[in-house]
Amino acid sequence: MRALLAVTAFAAALVWHPIGAAAQDPVHVIPEFTFESGEKLAGMKVGYATQGKLNDAKSNAILVTHGASGIRTGNAPLIGPGKAYDTDKYFVITVDAIGGGNSSQPKDGLGPKFPKYTIRDMVRAQHDLLTKGLGLARVIAVGGPSMGAQQGLEWGIHYPDFMDGLLLIVPASRSDRHVRAIFDAVDAAIKLDPKYQDGNYTAQPRDGIIVGGMIYFPWLYSDEHLSTITDEAAWEKTSRAFGTAWANAWDANSLLSRYHAASRFDPSTPFGGDLGKALAQVKAKALIMPSMTDRTLPTYLARELYRGIKNVTYVEIPSYLGHLAGGPTNETSGEYVFVTAQIKKFLAELPAK
């Protein structure tokens, strides 16, 4: 039952359409955005939210990025007075990556014709927000969990003087064949739904989305955790919870494009395929914090970051919750306490400005 409650709570957190908040949070608009592919989009929207107060020197800002299933509210349990991202100290900026939330995405009208985007495209849009929209010349730290760590890493590579720290939580140096295999199966499941109609659907292909979530579900946890679900009815509900949350929250084309970007993440591309050269660009100190039981992004991918980045703190989250240990929502859980303590310690040790 504890396992059922855990995954159901996480799935509920993915239903990220609080209508009031969506209407009130600001949106930065880039008049014309050029994607890495060369495609252009007029009026690129970058949704964001802020908490805390920016000091007079504009030196206390932190950019917190989210995972592939999330939007700007994805790290909410860790943000607030006295929390990991302490709003009594920091001006915390959360942003919608391209493809979801209040940012430009396929469901705005282009559907399957929306430009294919990369993690680097997300980061360039965010840089425009921070510099031109918010008038910031640098921040204390950038990063977050999973795809949030991918964004943080690309920030560190392409804007190495913009931050003092990188928060790379349940991270990966790249999306390798293992990662691609998982999400290629998710992609195929959604597209096999007869309602998908090559992306030109008139009704959401919910069945395909739910099955896609069922494919992803066992990769989110460790075998040890899955073995705790002994009741058959609880297993049936739990195995469908993640996909059901996707189906309730996501447009199919938007979901597919988001996971395509995350599963094709490769920071070495601009460096001729040389990952070592890419990681050598990072100047900021990095907190590398994988989950010791992660099967979505196994720890060998975090260790590649450890070997390639010059100045790192490496610590594994002692949890059997697998990939989900990096985004704890229960403030009394061991994962929440551990992640909070590590983030606080890391931020406190960065150079004072």
Image (tube, rainbow, N blue to C red):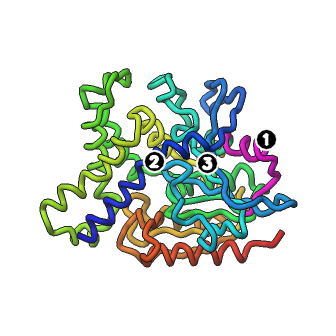
User: Residue 16 bears which disc, if any?
Assistant: 2
Q: Which residue is mark 1?
A: 132
Whole-angstrom CA distance, mark 2 to mark 3, is 14 Å
Counting from the top left corner in percent of width and height, residue 57 is at: 87, 60
Q: Are marks 1 and 2 in contact (CB under 8 Å)?
A: no
Q: Secondary structure at mark 2?
A: loop
Residue at the (45%, 69%) spot, across then down: 291
Question: In the rendered structure, does residue 17 fall within the stretch colored magenta?
Answer: no
Closest to the observer, 113 or 12:
12
Residue type, numbered disc 1: Lys
Task: Return the disc, 1 or 2, that comes first in the chain's sequence.
Answer: 2
Quadrant in which residue 288 is drawn: bottom right
Dividing the picture into quarters, in which one does residue 229 lie?
bottom left
Report whether residue 172 is seen: no
Q: Nearer the viewer, residue 159 or 13?
A: 13
Q: Name the kind of residue labelled 2 in the image.
A: Trp
Q: CA distance from mark 1 to mark 3?
A: 15 Å
Question: Is 23 left, or right, of 330 in this rendering?
Answer: right
What residue sits 30% from the left and 43% below the top? 212
Residue at disc 3, secondary structure? strand
The magenta stretch spans residue 135? yes
Report the span colored magenta. 125-140
- Say if mark 1 contacts mark 3, CB within 8 Å: no
| Residue 95 tag number | 3
